[in-house]
Amino acid sequence: MSPACFWPILTFLPYAFHRKNPTFMKIAKALALRFSGFAITIDRLLSSNMATRKQFHKTGFENNKLMKRLYRQTGKAIGDFKMIEDQDRVMVCLSGGKDSFALLDILLGLQARAPIHFELVAVNLDQQLPGFPTDVLPAYLKDKGIPFHIETQDTYSIIRRLIPENKPVCSLCSRLRRGILYRVASELGATKIALGHHRDDVLETFFLNLFYGSKIKSMPPKLKTDDGKHIVIRPLVYVKETDIERFADIQQYPLFPKNLCGAKENVQRQQIKTLIREWEKKFPGRIENIFSSLSTIVPSHLMDNRLHDFNSLAADRSIRD
């Protein structure tokens, strides 16, 4: 029997299962009776795979909830901080990691729904790292029909020449990369530069500055570069890293191998990351409260004279008298 004969049944069955309507199931069985032995297969499918179907629908439901949450949180961040405006040209920095892939995907979805018009262009910096998968991103972006630019600059050789072996390279690498991306943004006429930092990045940076830098400081959702030429935005600032991990797993992005540069992992940041994950499990709501506190600051109840003029405080004489 030709496989094509089964298409009417295979097409109708998911609809029957989804509706859970006896009439639809009877029709499906009636169709199946035209093919020897197939009705038995359907009966078995209906009886033995109930748990599988429930799990399938539950998974689809959870994935749909995740997608809606990502769109909602990203859209809220964009609105709260006026990240993207009408006629903006947004340069999305694509590193090959889960965060930047998710950022590009979510912005594309929001672009299709937004009441304003804005352009997106994906940009990747090829730093000539050993083992860098040069063909992966162009193939992925061409397949998706996304405008992109690959900037090739051999910063790897510069870093190796200037930094002794086994010494931290992240600071210099970051400065070089940032300078190149700012230049590329000007060349492409980008009005905004979008980075893939998420909520956990913000919290980790906050605790690193608090514990090791003696500062109350984190990653801003939006900033103007030192030269005043560019606006950098972080649309995923409200999004949890675990949600991005789930989303990236669902989307099956062609992720780059980790630690291509060979730099040692930031031990302090990893410790903070572990601490945050533990708190989320043991103390529900704690991380949300800490994150919320970053936007509900009361300078008069801290100790920074630059933010609040404590020296000029004096009692109101008229009230005292």
Image (cartoon, rainbow, N blue to C red):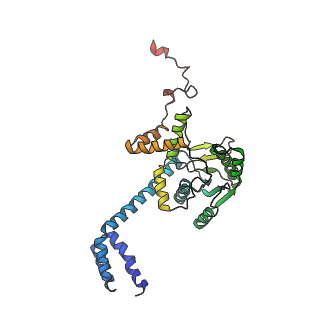
Which residue is depicted at the point 29% across and 80% down? 40
Quarter of the figure with the N terminus: bottom left
x and y percent of residue 86 in the render? 59, 53
Query: Viewer-proximal residue, 44 or 26?
Result: 44
Which residue is depicted at the point 62% across and 50% down? 193
x and y percent of residue 214 in the render? 55, 31
What residue occupies the far top of the structure in this picture? 321
Quarter of the figure with the C terminus: top left
- Residue 241: tell me if it is visible: yes
Note whether 202 is above or below 60 in the view shown. above
Note whether 88 is above or below 202 in the view shown. below
Image quadrant in which you'd find residue 24: bottom left
Note whether 179 is above or below 42 in the view shown. above
x and y percent of residue 22 in the render? 27, 73
Query: Viewer-proximal residue, 176 or 170?
Result: 170
Which residue is depicted at the point 44% across and 45% down? 277
Relative to 197, is 278 on the left or the right?
left
Which residue is depicted at the point 43% across and 56% down? 66
What residue occupies the far bottom of the structure in this picture? 1
Query: Viewer-proximal residue, 57 or 136?
Result: 136
Relative to 307, is 10 on the left or the right?
left
x and y percent of residue 116 in the render? 56, 55
Image quadrant in which you'd find residue 146: bottom right
What residue occupies the far front of the structure in this picture? 165
